[in-house]
Image (cartoon, grey):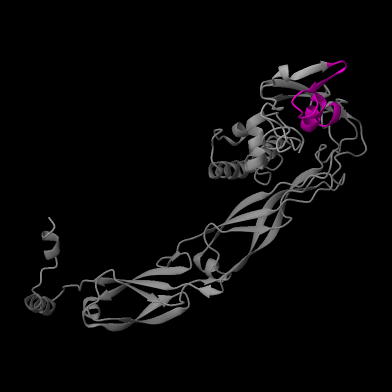
Amino acid sequence: MPATSKHDYYETLGVPRGAKEDEIRKSYRKLARKYHPDLNPGDKAAEERFKKVQEAYDVLSDAKKRQVYDQYGFYSDNIPPGGPGAGAGANSHGPGFGGFDFSDYVNQGAGAEYAGGAGNFRDIFSQFFGHKGERASAGPEKGSDLEYGMNIDFWESIRGTQVRLNVVRQEICQTCGGSGSTGGSSTVCPECDGSGNVTQMAGAMKFSLTCPRCDGKGRLRNVCPTCHGDGRLSKSEAVEVRIPPGAQAGSRLRVPGKGNAGRMGGAPGDLYITVRVEPHPFFVREGDDIHIQVPVTVSEAGLGAKIEVPTIDGRALLKVPQGTQNSQKFRLREKGVLNSRKNKRGDEIVEVVIQAPKVQDERTKELLRELSQVNTEDPRKEMWSKV
């Protein structure tokens, strides 16, 4: 990725500089939907904003790229995290562009060498921007990854499913084959506005560099009229996605090669899909276990009974022992979700909820009075002892 500083990535995504990863991802998704080319057909301004949002997210979603951007105010592949010379044996007062100590440089005629042994001054610029201030030779650049969210229902998450997702991704321009140029007249370079130079900040220092897009010429020759020199176009594509059985809410699925197309013959990025599972009316999943609350009558709880309870496989028998208390839990082994990695199923946890009988006639009242005379124990006795 060439060095970029035309706009503030944090401002583009509408997040503060200290924003966390989830906050950045949430803002990106909101803006990507708002300026999506499919939702704004023919709107060039929305398409351009969509590209800027994608570019900002590509840098800020990557911890190493974000570190470089935060430190220097722009991102370039030529700058390793930690700055020029990082990991290359630079000493404590080595070449960090945030504040040079020029007393460590001694003039030696036409050149200046660093007395601390971290290489000469020209080498520092080479690490930062390529040899002699010129752009390093452009090589293949991998396309950026895409992030999408997908809603599935409870049973699709349990059993797995195959879904089709419409994805907007940058594909290689068929007109120019991704080169960005074809037959036609030259145009003013949009990167440097025709000056041939771009300005970059590195700490407190300001540099004027050769424009990486036009190589200092100020104009682009034979710009492709279809992609306007970018080499890629945003297009919508239907992608088949397989949701494996047992997928949990928050699961992140990877579809290789379905991200944005690369540059200069670089490989495409990947598509990542975050799964959101809609809740079930009474099944609640916790890990590989299924939890459910089942109502029982007073007589079933008091006398004991065998009752049928729902499971994800259908009905199952549960033995409710005599004297079962309200909210007591029972475990049905291997009636939970299959974990394909462990090749093992979770359990179903059944919590009984004792329901009081409906008093609608005199006979019911009479029976309850008889029960109260037989069972005279105060259920709140233990509470009073602790007050």
Seen from the viewer's position, the closer of residues 298 and 120 is: 120
Seen from the viewer's position, the closer of residues 36 and 70 is: 70
Above or below 91: residue 50: below
Question: Which quadrant of the figure has residue 376?
Answer: bottom left
Q: Position of residue 285 (x, y in %)?
A: 45, 65
Residue lying furthest left:
373
Q: Quadrant of the C terminus?
A: bottom left
Above or below 117: residue 381: below
Horizontal placement of 177 versus 292: left or right? right
Question: Which quadrant of the figure has residue 291?
Answer: bottom left
Residue lying furthest right:
183
Above or below 188: residue 366: below
Horizontal placement of 21 versus 112: left or right? left
Asked whether the viewer can see residue 193, the reply is: no
Q: Position of residue 331 (x, y in %)?
A: 38, 75
The residue under the point 90% across, 30% down is 186
Q: Position of residue 49 (x, y in %)?
A: 67, 36
Asked whether the viewer can see residue 290, the reply is: yes
Seen from the viewer's position, the closer of residues 343 and 234 is: 343
Horizontal placement of 300 versus 256: left or right? left
Region of the chain picked out in magenta, as a range: 108-132
Above or below 94: residue 375: below
Is 124 a magenta residue?
yes
Q: Quadrant of the N terminus?
A: top right
The residue under the point 25% across, 82% down is 304
